[in-house]
Amino acid sequence: MKYRLLAALICFPILVNIAQAVEISDQTGECLMCHNAVTPGIVADWKKSLHAKVTMSEALRKPKRERRVSVAQAPDNSADVVVGCAECHTINPEDHQDTFDHNDHQVHIVVTPKDCAGCHMVETEQYSQNIMSQAYGNLKNNPLYHSLMDSINGVQSFENMQTSLAPADEATNADSCFYCHGTKVEVKGMASRDTEMGEMEFPVLTGWPNQGVGRINPDGSKGACTPCHPRHQFSIEVARKPAACIGCHKGPDVPAYQVYNVSKHGNIYSAVGKDWDFKAVPWVLGRDFTAPTCATCHISQIVTEDGEVVAERSHQLTDRLPFRLFGLIYAHPFPKSPDTTIIRNKAGLPLPTELTGEPVTEYLIDENEQQKRLKTMQKICLACHSQQWVAGHFTRLKHTIEYTNRMTLTATRIMLTAWEKGAAKGLTQNDSIFNESIEKKWVAQWLFFANSTRFASAMAGADYGVFANGRWFMSKNIQEMADWLEFKLKMMEDKKDD
Amino acid sequence: MKYRLLAALICFPILVNIAQAVEISDQTGECLMCHNAVTPGIVADWKKSLHAKVTMSEALRKPKRERRVSVAQAPDNSADVVVGCAECHTINPEDHQDTFDHNDHQVHIVVTPKDCAGCHMVETEQYSQNIMSQAYGNLKNNPLYHSLMDSINGVQSFENMQTSLAPADEATNADSCFYCHGTKVEVKGMASRDTEMGEMEFPVLTGWPNQGVGRINPDGSKGACTPCHPRHQFSIEVARKPAACIGCHKGPDVPAYQVYNVSKHGNIYSAVGKDWDFKAVPWVLGRDFTAPTCATCHISQIVTEDGEVVAERSHQLTDRLPFRLFGLIYAHPFPKSPDTTIIRNKAGLPLPTELTGEPVTEYLIDENEQQKRLKTMQKICLACHSQQWVAGHFTRLKHTIEYTNRMTLTATRIMLTAWEKGAAKGLTQNDSIFNESIEKKWVAQWLFFANSTRFASAMAGADYGVFANGRWFMSKNIQEMADWLEFKLKMMEDKKDD
Amino acid sequence: MKYRLLAALICFPILVNIAQAVEISDQTGECLMCHNAVTPGIVADWKKSLHAKVTMSEALRKPKRERRVSVAQAPDNSADVVVGCAECHTINPEDHQDTFDHNDHQVHIVVTPKDCAGCHMVETEQYSQNIMSQAYGNLKNNPLYHSLMDSINGVQSFENMQTSLAPADEATNADSCFYCHGTKVEVKGMASRDTEMGEMEFPVLTGWPNQGVGRINPDGSKGACTPCHPRHQFSIEVARKPAACIGCHKGPDVPAYQVYNVSKHGNIYSAVGKDWDFKAVPWVLGRDFTAPTCATCHISQIVTEDGEVVAERSHQLTDRLPFRLFGLIYAHPFPKSPDTTIIRNKAGLPLPTELTGEPVTEYLIDENEQQKRLKTMQKICLACHSQQWVAGHFTRLKHTIEYTNRMTLTATRIMLTAWEKGAAKGLTQNDSIFNESIEKKWVAQWLFFANSTRFASAMAGADYGVFANGRWFMSKNIQEMADWLEFKLKMMEDKKDD
């Protein structure tokens, strides 16, 4: 094929240059011949990665705590080559609906956690138990959350003095909620495309591009590693820095990054984080860093200078999370299963609490498990804080959970009254509970204000929990809801009188 | 004059120190004698600049792609001296209304793009075709935008149960809209001032200080280079980093920086940007940086390691912008002319669309030009992303433009109904369409929420486009506008009945 | 005691390692024996501090301008050891209510400004005159501010169509307002706790943990040094970087950090601050930094390369602050005393202005003092800006203060009308003036929008003062308040008619 000769002529010097430094597979070598010119940014990025510099044989010779791989041996025939294009994009070809013939190679477009598991098995298995891996289905297949999504993303119209709402379309959802939650990526036929190397055929993907944490992949697997380890450096440094979480956790619904930013931990990171070592494995507390980032508390393997293990690495982030602070009407103990679509409260709603806040205990972890997770988290705190400090901190968080749940309950009571008196249309009228203005105020109470207040408490970023998006807004919102209800009922009454 | 001797005594050692390293002009040497003591920060900053280290002769000896200057020869007699105080502050004296006698030198205070053109001609010409250079007039001389500015900046009063609005004054506008858009800087006489060097005379400037992108300068030129290349380092590093844009593009009206911040590109920059080379010219993709900043996509000259040109440098940023996503009621194709005051829609309003969204095509670029600009931009994307990825991204952006325009149209329909029924006063009542509470809700729909949603889509910072200031708020705002209208009409009706 | 042997066995090698480098006291050596294992993060952090590397004898040998200590001699017997655990945690044992017997040492938990004064006397004395040191009492003991706190932090209920408000509890206040203002830390008995070293007794502290700027300490002193100099590095670098202020000054009530962030100063810091020297003492303008951070203008000792003093270090930040821009209803000259609870206006309210804005001059600094403070601040500006630039900047700030005060007055007039007509309950009804929805809109007018506009003006971050949280919101808020009042009065009237 003509493109090969052309590519060889263009790329040969660069290829030689790459090949000298490391042992790359023949397959990857062929990829690079063209892609060095076609997607030079990807190749350059990969060249900076550990994947481009270390073979599995070398990686496996490291002491266990220093390893970044978690299998006992390399996938077939790849032990002595670096991890190049082909090693990831041609693994497990039979599983991949998106495998296609690309210059005589069986290549797939979407590299999935199942592919990464060839070398990072433990992390992949942990992640599959993490609630994030179910983020697509937990939103898509929960009728209540789905209707929340519709109420936000659906096109509204205004005619004859009435608004109406169309269901949200896939393109909007993909550019909105599913951007983080993940899309469903499927192959819908093949398409011919004019490339720098001539006319070529490629699979056509739905929901593409996407790097959501719960993406449904063309090999049937769930999730993606790229939200935190961006292509094609897959850098541990990027994943350990707080910006890794900002893509999904900055909005007022989950203001983790913003709270961290105003916390003492974030302050120290901002000021002297430049001097820390974000690449060291294991990550040595006090030597490599002097204040935690998100990863420190929630994922990473942490050891002391003496080699004592403070925390084991876990990509099941829920291992360190006793409570679910956000996303639902009330904070509650973490659900047992990462698949939350199975949950039903007494009223039959797919919610982990009743509308009035009582937890649906059978689906939630018990007190013992909560304590276990709390202790795992607190062991990290205790490396730098006294027992009394840590106990005081978590006592306040617990108090704040109760406080915010009560303030949400008050807002819910106003809402229930509005539904009952017909000031708004709710479940009994078979209407969405999220689409009217008073309902949206109610949603803001828990989805933004109560959540933000809890995050501010949990991560010691108090400034965020008062005026930024916290207690001030909870207190104001209740007053505005009560006002609205009074005005509305008066208007309804007057209309009846007319 | 006594100050000279004094200055010479004080500054001589420092001057010798500077003079040894570089060849500075006699004139600049005289400036430094005093200003090293009077404004030490400016002198120190300048000493760190390339201007203080390189002569035009040296600059012109570089290969073309490595040059930061774009003329064939230096301005008169300055080829072999570094670019010091005098080289900029005494150039083109006859053009400058603010030229004054300063210790026998004809100095002007405001250095303008026309002055910079002595060495950076191409950039200055490109910038003059950039819509930013017209930012002052486009706001000041468009009666509709002017009334928006008045409605925000004017002092309101409350008497006899009525609010009233005074027109905005110049000082407030200068501290507000014109801070970014630019002020009109004119000389209003001379004033005597007591300085460290004795009593001296200086021109009195209106609208000063200002570094707005469309500043009207005392030499009649438009714009300023300093918003992006701050005095007196004029560093390319500063201009290439995302913070360069934050001064004008962080508010909810143009949340470019915030969207970048939550995008994968921003995430990578935050984490590993410290390792990139922001000074290299040309800027080599993959080698000097591994994810784009604002400048990468919108301005910079980008080449690959093989020397292939991915993008030509252009200070006419609109060269890479097919659509205008912000600032107006509806997103629309970019205007042909940077001077937008010439635009009139069918209704006679100075708007690039009708109030109901139809674009006023005669003033806007056509489909061909849009495609051309899109391709210029996409060529940069394609260096790191596949064709399908890029196509998918822009398909979504197009969808999001349509979606947000429809949501704005719905808000506009409520607004039109309010005006029609007399619930608010609009054009037919010869009243501002921006000054009442319902009108301000309408403005928020497009100026903040629709804009933010489009930016989030355009720059792949989806988190910002849902709950931060995007779709959630569009959907809520429509409900609140409809509620308000219902309440207001009922009240009007009741009053009629009374 | 058994723990000692255990500790010695575990920690000996590390201790030797530390001891070789520096001279540590026997007492501190004993602390480290256990704490190296028990709180390894603290020890590692301290080891990176200057405290762990320099003795007072060495510190005192430096020329005065280079010193970081401000006493003539070291506290008893500590001149030739580095400043370790014991030097701070066992100083002034008799003053400390929280002193307890800890393995035969009289240790206290909370290190206070009075303890730090042993070496940093001048800074401690200055800080005690700073309004921050009174932040606890100024909030707690001002009945009006206290009721604002209650209105935000108190739990609200909804029953019989009415909301009601309970007073805020201490735990919520500690996790909210007092987090920054400081809590009252007192000893409430002793408690036994199971530690890695066996069962031990510790004092039980109220309001702990806390690092608020006005903390009431167990030795009776006020304030904390740790909000800006975080434990246990106490780094000057951290304190000089803008993130030091973010913990308390990011919310919309005091958006200093956000305004800085969009200012040209912040832009330059973001881009090239990485190249600056944040550890140099004295801090040399132009050499060590080329744009100010918060500390530069508000606290630090600044000199030129020639050694000229631009600003003397002052931990009484008010030395450079003529106006109080935030926190109160109207901007006004700074109060004379850091204790603001003594202030009463003509109406008898504990406010520095009347409700209609007139300043209560007897409690506020006069014009002379304002000018003096302004000049102190401006001397820093003038190092990099011309006189005209600086004069123009402050003229605009003054104008913006007047403008925002007028916009607040208009909102207040609507509020006064609402109280007068019974649309809301205020002082005459003996009700909080902060708890109803219209009152909360009024609070937002000054506490968020007017404040933010002033900050944006003061720090040249104009973008923040228009659409982010400034003029746009002031103008909108007035319209919404007027609308609400009209609706409410109509409803009241209709009810009367019923």
Image: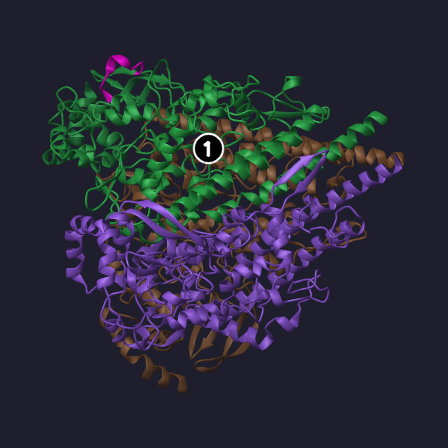
Chain colours: A purple, B green, C brown
Give the residue at the far front of this rendering. A1
Question: Percent position (x, y) of residue C349?
Answer: 66, 40
Which residue is labeled 1 in the image? Answer: C457
Amino acid residing under circle 1: Ser
Question: Percent position (x, y) of residue C318?
Answer: 45, 42
Residue placed at 78% from the left, 37% from the top?
A: C422
Residue placed at 57% from the left, 68% from the top?
A: A334
Answer above or below: position of A157 versus B121: below
**Which residue is more in the foreground, A42 or A301?**
A42
Judge from the rendering whether residue B234 lies leftward or rightward of residue B206; answer left or right.
left
**Magenta span has C130?**
no
Subunit of label 1? C
Res. A360 in view? yes
Question: Percent position (x, y) of residue A35?
Answer: 26, 52
**Which residue is more in the foreground, A306 or C302?**
A306
For label 1, the crowd category at 10 Å Cα-Cα, with few meaning under 14, some 14 to 19 and many 20 or more, is many
Q: How many marks?
A: 1
Magenta region, residue range: B89-98
